[in-house]
Amino acid sequence: MWRIALFAGCLILVAAPASAQDKATIVKLNDAWAAAFNKGDASAVAAMYTEDAFVLPPGAEMVKGRAAIEAFWRQAAQQMGDAKFTTVDVLALGPGAAREIGTVSLKSKSQPPQEITAKYAVVWRKVGGKWKLATDIWNTSK
């Protein structure tokens, strides 16, 4: 997942794009995350994060660790639902990590429901052979 490139007369290691298989896996994991969130299953959402993961919500304190992440998403699921992800790019960061860039849309549970759209960057890390979210940050364009 690394390639050697020549830059300014020096050999450097450059992260190669993730394989189509890794991207497909991450898209499936995003679908599973959305399904769990849309059901209000904060425990299943939190299980998709590493034990020491960080969630960095806009305008709020960072959330660290799976238990705190579960509490965060439990509260969020009371206010929002109908999450849908679009993966824009996946970049391998070595054999056990990948960076994903994408967009997400959700609907508020207020009346009338409002559409919420955001862009995100996450770092996935392989733990025990399974991809888990290690860092999760997002913001809106408005």
Image (cartoon, helix red, strand yellow):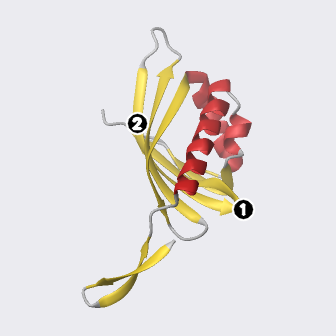
Give the side of residue 99 with respect to residue 126, left or right.
Answer: left
Figure disc tally: 2
> Contact, CB < 8 Å: mark 1 with mark 2?
no
Residue under label 1: 129
Q: Can see residue 63? A: no
Whole-number angstrom distance, CA of label 1 to CA of label 2: 29 Å
Residue at point 56%, 48% (across, down): 24
Q: Is 9 situated above or below 67?
A: below
- Foreground mark, 1 or 2, reads 1
70 or 37: which is nearer to us?
37
Element under label 1?
A: loop
Earlier sequence position, callout 1 versus callout 2 = 2
135 or 87: which is nearer to us?
87
Mark 1 neighbour class, 10 Å CA radius: few under 14, some 14 to 19, many 20 or more: few
* Res 57 label: none
Disc 1 marks a residue whose amino acid type is Gly
Mark 2 neighbour class, 10 Å CA radius: few under 14, some 14 to 19, many 20 or more: some
Residue at point 42%, 26% (across, down): 116
Q: Position of residue 139 (x, y in %)?
A: 40, 41
Element under label 2?
A: strand
Identify the residue at the far left of this view: 8
Q: Quadrant of residue 4?
A: bottom left
Q: Is 99 situated above or below 86?
A: below
Q: Position of residue 56 (x, y in %)?
A: 50, 48
Q: Position of residue 6 (x, y in %)?
A: 31, 84
Residue under label 2: 118
Identify the residue at the far bottom of this view: 9
Q: Position of residue 65 (x, y in %)?
A: 66, 52
72 or 126: which is nearer to us?
126
Q: Can see residue 80? A: yes
